[in-house]
Image (spheres, helix red, strand yellow):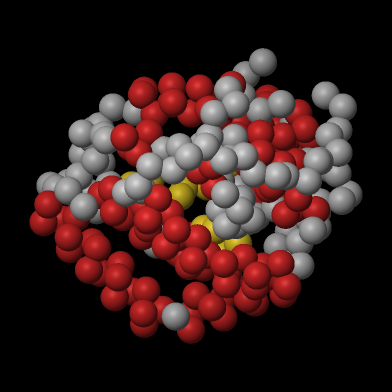
Amino acid sequence: MTGKTEFGQVRQLVSNPKSATRRGLPLWKRLLDLILVLATAPFWLVFVVAIAIWIKVVSPGSIFFFQERLGYRGRRFMIFKFRTMEVNAETRSHEEHLQHLINSDCPMTKLDASGDRRIIFGGRLLRATGLDELPQLFNVLRGEMSLIGPRPCTPQEYLHYKPWQAERLNAFPGLTGYWQVNGKNKTTFSEMIEMDIHYARNLSPSLDLLIIFKTFPAILQQLTESKLPVPDQKISVQPITRKAA
C-alpha cells in the first residue's frame, strides 16, 4: 500500500466521535492561540532574532529547518524549526532510532541525549529547552498548528502507525501538549499515543490552560534531567478504548 493511500485513509481512521470536533479548530482554541501568540510577540520575537543570529555565527548555512509533517486529520504542512544540526547532516540514524522506539517498549529518549556530533554548538541547549521550535509560532498564526496539541508526526512515522493510533490526528498539532507535561522522555511510544488520544477526546479550555501552566516547570525538569542520570520510571496512563483494526 502506498504512502498516498495510507494518508488518504486518515479521515476514516480518525472518525471516532469521542475525539476533537470534525469541523476543525474550535473557535475558543483559535482565539486562545491568537491572543497568547500576539500578546507575547514582543517577547518571543527577541528570542527569535537572537537565536537566528547565533546560528548564523556558529554554523554557515540556513537558519531554519523545514520538514513536511501531518497535521489535523492528516493534512500535510511544512513545519518551521531552527536548524540545530550541521547542513546536510545525515538523517538515517534518526529514522532508525525513531523506528526502534515505535517497535519497542523503550522510553522516548532523543537520539542526541547521549551525544551527537551532528549538533551545532549550542544546538543541544536549544533542543533541550524547546527553543528550536519557536518558529512554529508562525505555524500557529497560519492556522496549521495550535499552541497545545500532539506533536505533528512525519509521513514516514505515520506509515508505522497501527489503525487505532491514527486517532491522535483528531487534534490539531501543537508546540506543547498533554504528553510533554506528563513524562515525555520517560514514556514509551504507545504511551505517548494514548496520552495524545486522551487529549483529543477531552479537549477543553481548562485542559489547555492547565497544560500551558505546567509547560514551563516541565521544561525546567527536562533541563535538569538532561544533565543528571534519571532512573527508569513508568508513567501510569489511563487505558484507551481502541478501535478495531
Q: Which residue is outermost to the front?
A: 231
Q: Is residue 143 visible?
A: no
Residue 245 vs residue 99: left or right? Answer: right
Which quadrant is home to the N terminus?
top right
Which quadrant is home to the C terminus?
top right
Residue at 68%, 25% (x, y): give it: 5
Is 185 above or below relative to 48? above
Q: What percent of the width, then of the height, locates residue 97? A: 44, 26
Residue at 31%, 35% (x, y): give it: 114
Residue at 73%, 72% (x, y): give it: 205
Q: What percent of the width, then of the height, locates residue 240? A: 81, 41
**Which one is in front, 210 or 201?**
210
Tell me where residue 135 sits by quadrant.
bottom left
* Mark count: 0
Q: What percent of the width, then of the height, locates residue 131? A: 36, 60
**Which one is in front, 105 or 157?**
105
Q: Which residue is outermost to the top?
A: 1
Tell me where residue 25 sits by quadrant.
bottom right
Q: Is residue 194 visible?
A: yes
Residue 173 vs residue 58: left or right? Answer: right
Is 204 above or below relative to 236? below
**Which one is in front, 241 or 219?**
219
Residue 22 vs residue 149: left or right? Answer: right
**Which one is in front, 113 or 164?**
113
Residue at 66%, 28% (x, y): give it: 161
Q: What percent of the width, then of the height, locates residue 70? A: 58, 42
Is 32 above or below relative to 152? below
